[in-house]
Amino acid sequence: MGQILNVVNNIHNFFDEHGDPRLAQVPMMSSPIPTIAISLAYIYFAKFLGPQLMKNRKPFQLKKVILVYNLLQVLLSTYLFYEVPPTLFVLQIMISLQIGMSGWFTGEYSLRCQPVDYSNEPSALRMLHAAKWFYIAKFIDFSDTIFFVLRKKFSHVSILHVIHHSIMPVSIWFGLKLAPGGHGTFFALLNSFVHLVMYSYYFLSVLGPQVQKYLWWKKYLTGLQMLQFLCVIVHAFQLVLIDCNFPRVFVWVIGLHGVLFFLLFSNFYSETYKKKKQLDMKSN
């Protein structure tokens, strides 16, 4: 037990020394251990505990809950992507979710090379605040899986789904703690836009058959996600060739994340749509 406590203390000390001091008092930011523990608990629930608890139970009817959830996710993603005047009645925590207009759309950020601003300038603090809520949003995304499990849609809880959801909070924790801003937030910008489109689709699909017949563009959502990862790969790995004051380790972390998820989503697209098309052609 003493050795474990020493390891935990060393981890705390390391990130206290090397992490962004502006996050010193932010909950769960002193160490990655809580985030890793929550992600592991999520995996356990998604693949083992949840299905076991639901084994002899009827699926929950959650249409209204999911409808509200998807709408809130659309609003959340909109706040992450655009700057919206804080005069609306939407949840106060969403007011600061302004990654897009905090830099990328105002001309302050460069697509070629954008170092992290660790200062207390208003623009830097604004991006830091937006990045914190992007991190929190990745935990909110766990609700997708919880709803699948409670509705006994176990086939939707695929390896791709669980890997994607469980890795994101942990990866973003390290980015937030060590490099909260700059070049790495381009991924957050793209991801927020994809989620805006994705949860809009989910919201519409819950409305029933009268709306679902117009949702022919479902397969293009996966294509949009794959395009997102290609953009992330190019945007990240260009810094391998460019001298930029951005932590090189995160160039590789972000770029390799893009490669991993592009391959996983490509395989999903092939399995789901290309094989289905081939089966349809054979049946005809």
Image (cartoon, rainbow, N blue to C red):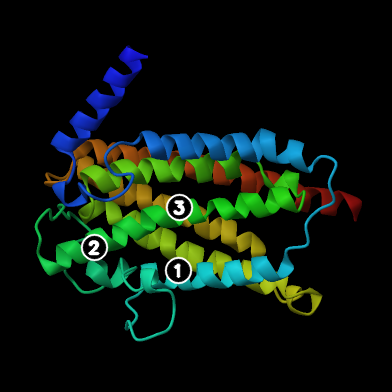
Residue ranking furthest to the bottom: 87
Mark 2 belongs to which amino acid?
Answer: Met
Q: Earlier in the sequence, mark 2 or mark 3?
A: 2
User: Looking at the image, which residue is at 24% across and 69% down?
Assistant: 102
Residue 76: assigned label: 1
Q: Secondary structure at mark 3?
A: helix
Point out residue 269 in the picture as x, y percentages from the top left corner: 63, 49
Q: Which residue is mark 3?
A: 138
Task: Estimate the x, y position of residue 96 in percent, counting from the top left.
Answer: 31, 70
> As shown in the figure, which amino acid type bears the numbered disc 3?
Lys
Pick whichever, 74 or 243, lies toward us. Answer: 74
Please say whether residue 181 is visible from this viewpoint.
Answer: yes
- Residue type highlighted by circle 1: Leu
Q: Earlier in the sequence, mark 1 or mark 2?
A: 1
Left or right, 214 with respect to 132, comes to right
Classed neighbour count for the residue bearing mark 1: other residues with Cα under 10 Å, few (<14), some (14–19), many (≥20): many
